[in-house]
Image (tube, rainbow, N blue to C red):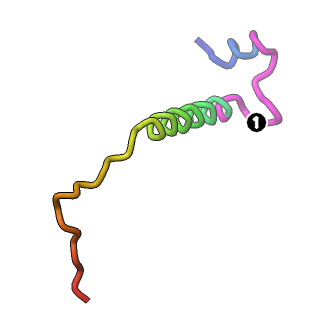
């Protein structure tokens, strides 16, 4: 199966603003990963620090 011919059959072109559709598909995949990671990490509540341990002291 030739994806370029499928794309041309659906939309009539294989480029957008002079850039090949492979670039736009890859950019969409990266954007989807970034949005999903942000949604997941913003939904996770931060861990509360353990107050039973004394803070670490660093010698000068």
Identity of the residue furthest to the front in this view:
51
Tell me the residue at 81%/36% (across/down).
Answer: 18
Badge 1 density bin: few <14, some 14–19, many ≥20, Cα 10 Å:
few
Does residue 41 sit above or below 4 in this rendering? Answer: below
Percent of width and height locating residue 38: 51, 39
Tell me the residue at 48%/40% (across/down).
Answer: 42
Quadrant of the frame with the N terminus: top right
Give the camera-side residue of 48 and 36: 48
Give the camera-side residue of 28 and 36: 36
**Magenta residues, start to end:** 10-23
Residue 36 covered by magenta stretch:
no
* Location of mark 1 (residue): 19
Which image quadrant for residue 3? top right
Quadrant of the frame with the C terminus: bottom left
Percent of width and height locating residue 26: 60, 33
Tell me the residue at 17%/58% (across/down).
Answer: 52
Does residue 9 sit above or below 21 in this rendering? Answer: above
Give the camera-side residue of 35 and 55: 55
Give SS at disc 1: strand
């Amino acid at each position: 199966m030739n994806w370029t011919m499928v794309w041309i059959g659906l939309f009539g072109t294989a480029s957008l603003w002079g850039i090949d559709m492979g670039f736009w598909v890859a950019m969409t995949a990266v954007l989807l990963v970034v949005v999903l990671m942000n949604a997941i990490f913003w939904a996770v509540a931060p861990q509360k620090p353990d107050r039973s341990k004394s803070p670490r002291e660093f010698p000068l």
